[in-house]
Amino acid sequence: MTADTHTRDSVEGANLSDRPSPTTHPGIAEFVAETAALTKPERVQWVTGSPEEWTELTDALVATGTFTRLNPALKPNSFYAASDPIDVARVEDRTYICSVDEKDCGPTNNWMDPQEMKTLMRGLYDGCMRGRTMYVVPFVMGHLEAEKPMFGVEITDSAYVVVSMLVMARSGTHVLKRIEELEAAGESPQWVPALHSVGMPLEPGQADVAWPCNETKYIVQFPEERAIWSFGSGYGGNALLGKKCYALRIASVMARDEGWLAEHMLILKLTSPQGVVKFIAAAFPSACGKTNLAMLRPTIPGWKVETLGDDIAWMRVGEDGRLWAVNPEYGFFGVAPGTNQKTNPNAMDTIDKGNSVFTNVALTEDGDIWWEGLENTPAKATSWKGEPWTPDSEELSSHPNSRYCTPIKQCDILAAEYDDPRGVPIDAILFGGRRRTTVPLVFEARDWTHGTFLGATLSSETTAAAVGQVGVVRRDPMAMLPFIGYNAGHYFNHWITVGKENDAAKLPKIFYVNWFRRDEDGGFLWPGFGENSRVLKWVVERMEGQADAVETPIGYVPTVDSLDVEGLDMTRDAVEAALAVDAEEWQAELPQIQEWFEKFGDDLPAVLWTELDGLRARLDVPSGG
Ligand SMILES: Nc1nc2c(ncn2[C@@H]2O[C@H](COP(=O)(O)OP(=O)(O)OP(=O)(O)O)[C@@H](O)[C@H]2O)c(=O)[nH]1
Ligand SMILES: O=C([O-])CC(=O)C(=O)O
Ligand SMILES: [Mn+2]
């Protein structure tokens, strides 16, 4: 790499404040100078976002062994990376909401006093970038032309993180210029300082490893300051700080204060054969099907899905009283295993265009990638652990939470509205979880408050997206359990308030789905993926007043005949089983919901207790039972 004095400052022996700052923004200059003084990197590099810089960064990552360049004929400008096996997923037990008052953190988050946390983390950060480059990544979540752009500056000592940020968020000099312009115009643009280190300084002469990280990890949000400090992990959700840390945890706090919603939701555009257009947002927990639904290829004739986002939605009530959503991201960070030409052809086409990073998948002998569920199983490959792998191997070739990181603009079915800073007006919100039993394929909430109750009590089996046991049913409210940046009781109240303060007729209708119900043999009752278009069709027809439903204790469930199953290899009994509402199974949920709600004490909105009482009564259970 060549020394470029414009983008790189040596801080060894020099005081950063001696030299002209690469930014006219005093706050950002100070953040960079203070961080450099604390972390003591060998050099500082301002990330521009230019193609030359991408080449330089990826070449360097190949040289250090972090990246393996994939076969350009198969995956142009794309790279394979394997993490340290101790750094494969989000670390929820190491994630903190350091609000000034512990009560504001609530019972679902980890808390530590912010000053105590800062003292502890300053100790970890002291000298932590020794021997490394400190990169400064100016970025914006959402549109640069938004009325109030949501800026951030991520400082990181990981080139892997920089390359991933360049894919996942609008990043680089053009963003910094915009911040400076707005600042010069006296508009005090809002920006979130986000500090990241892999936590592995290099002493002189010490060789680097392919995936530097630290056994000690902290993923910390300071909600009042709107600041993020992350240490010890290079994994996406822990290290690409624009994503979960900013666009969900910090943004949810901003949203509470400013009256909007920051949610773990996909956004899709659905067009019926008659040309009726609906925008749908859906919240499913991590690794529970958002990416797949967002890019769905309908199996029913004449229906069309276009994608706006696969993970995060920021939604505001517009002047017209409707809920308008934007996707703040610029790429997809998708679960690899299970993705193939049948389940998600649009994702396959997106990654085949290249310019992507694949982490913890298998590497094939022809320089391509492979994972469980992909077509053309290779006779031989190298597993994510770097070991020889064959189809007979007992171990998986790819980590269950292996991911592809790919530009959203490469998606052939990206909706044109993606580029509109106003976003799209949402017609329906789907909540969904991964449940083997109890929850039917789809049902409709009675109203917004009941929909909020469904969201607040959403339950799902844990997945490999977070470190910990997989397959355990837990409450994951609005699929936001790991992402609510404040007291979840207050968050439920915020949802209730959005319903109260607006015209219910104009707000989205709320539905609940479960693609993961099983039969007695353990097989999925519903084929899922492209066939989920049948459920979307029912949702649209409900909104248009065209589809029948049965009123059940839990909400409105499709009649067997109202769900279009034409051409589907499913018996009537199987469809009935997928739609069944079993009173006993639901009665068993009641004490669990009761226990969940009790966690929040006085912070739980009283109307949610009323909703639980209503459900209990409809299930014919005496109150308190
Ligand atoms: N059985 C079944 N599995 C599905 C369906 N949709 C998705 N999956 C599986 O669910 C897993 C994760 O799906 P994704 O769409 O990547 O999950 P996500 O919600 O985007 O996850 P995050 O990126 O972690 O937030 C994959 O293994 C999919 O194969 C479905 O309709 N039926
Ligand atoms: O955060 C990540 O790394 C990936 C993701 O979308 C999730 O876990 O929900
Ligand atoms: Mn997610």
Image (cartoon, helix red, strand yellow):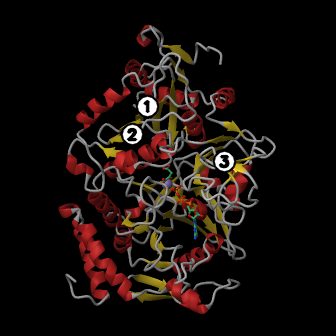
Compute the Cα span from label 2 to label 1. 9 Å
Q: Residue at x 47, y 11 (%)?
A: 12
Residue where numbered disc 2 is placed: 217
Residue where numbered disc 1 is placed: 199
Tell me the SS state at disc 3.
Answer: helix
Q: Position of residue 621 (x, y in %)?
A: 26, 88
Category of crowding for the residue at label 3, using alpha-carbon neighbours closer than 10 angstroms: few (below 14), some (14–19), many (at least 20): some
Q: Position of residue 68 (x, y in %)?
A: 68, 37
Q: Is mark 2 within 8 Å of ligand 2?
A: no
Pointer 2 with pointer 1, Cβ within 8 A: yes
**Label 3 amino acid?**
Lys
Compute the Cα span from label 2 to label 3. 33 Å
Residue where numbered disc 3 is placed: 409
Category of crowding for the residue at label 2, using alpha-carbon neighbours closer than 10 angstroms: few (below 14), some (14–19), many (at least 20): many
Tell me the SS state at disc 1.
Answer: loop
Compute the Cα span from label 3 to label 1. 33 Å
Q: Is mark 3 within 8 Å of ligand 1?
A: no
